[in-house]
Amino acid sequence: MCSGVSRMKLYCFDRTFFRSSHALNPIQLPAPMETHLWYVKPSEVKSESLLKQYLDILSPCERENVLRMQGEEPRKGALLARALVRTSIARYQTNSQIDPRSLKFQKNTHGKPEVHWQKSDDWDPPPLHFNISHTSSLVACGVTINSQIGIDVEEKHRRTKHNILSFARRYFSKYEVQFLAAISDPQVQQMEFIKLWTLKEAYVKALGIGFSGAPFKTFTIRFKEGTSTKASDIVVDSFDDVRSWQFSLLELANSHYAAICTEKHAASGGERNIPRKLRVWKTIPLLEDECISGTDGVKTICGF
């Protein structure tokens, strides 16, 4: 496994702090070899009027699903997840300014959400892809152009109810179980297990075929030694998938691991291992955005 924390290839063209009670800060779409990551911490969203604004931008079906959830914390998390998706996508400059309320979504045959753009004769919708993940303490949304994406976030110190190795033998590949079994320190073993889990989840979500279509045991995540700053640090071995993928494993806010999996394309000058650029924002939707790329708020463990 990659160890330590290395600086990642981060780009932030506007590191100003943005505040507004109504508007979204418009930005350019991600470049072809670029990933954008937005995240919000539910504990920092305390305004009841702001939560009401989030409800107002949801579709009737989304609003009904949120309000139907039992428990204040899960309800708030679901609301923030939908609001983050809508406000993140709406801020991108396409053919015109987008109202978050106007966005429509559809699901592929396996249930992965996609933007359903309203096409017109004089406009081709952008090939935008997104994915979302959330825990009770952090919600994140990843965005790319022309590249499938899957993300997963987990708390660094998340505890499992079961013995780590027993749980791993049930869900992980033989190689991954051996990797974890070789770690003698229980705390380190726990953290490496969480890193592996986030990477495997991100890969399955990037595939977009659901967990039944790609059970965790059917593929292996490996960490290549000696290339701690390159995209080839993390590789996936799968008999069923011939596509190439790039991974990044991050630490967010000193409290969470975030895994990003994006599809490689040979169109980038023939080089398949060019590192992707990454821009990261901490946000409270409709209130404030802070680009934290290149700060201690986001650190690369390994990957692009």
Image: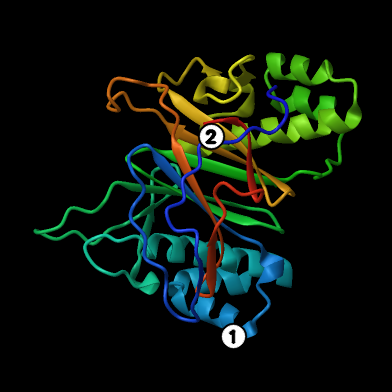
Residue nearer the viewer, 266 or 83 = 266
Residue nearer the viewer, 174 or 83 = 83
Dot 1 amino acid type: Ser
Dot 2 amino acid type: Val
Residue 172 placement (x, y as % from top left): 69, 24
Q: Is residue 238 above or below residue 77?
A: above
Would you call the spot at circle 1 few (<14 residues within 10 Å), some (14-19), or many (20 or more)?
few
In this rendering, the label closer to the viewer, 2 or 1: 1
Q: Is residue 71 visible from the viewing direction of this image? A: no
Residue nearer the viewer, 227 or 158 = 227
Residue 123 placement (x, y as % from top left): 15, 57
Q: Residue at x 10, y 59 (%)?
A: 122
Q: Is residue 213 above or below residue 270?
A: below
Q: Residue at x 68, y 77 (%)?
A: 46
- What residue is pinned by disc 2? 204
Q: Are marks 2 and 1 in contact (CB under 8 Å)?
A: no
Residue 121 placement: quadrant: bottom left
Considering the image in quadrants, where does the N terminus appear?
Answer: top right
Would you call the spot at circle 2 few (<14 residues within 10 Å), some (14-19), or many (20 or more)?
many
Residue 34 placement: quadrant: top left
Spatial CA span between label 2 and label 1: 36 Å
77 horizontally vs 11: left or right: right
Q: Residue at x 47, y 60 (%)?
A: 85
Question: Which residue is the extreme one toward the left?
Answer: 121
Q: Is residue 186 visible from the viewing direction of this image? A: yes
- What residue is pinned by disc 1? 49
240 horizontally vs 265: left or right: right
Q: Secondary structure at mark 2?
A: helix
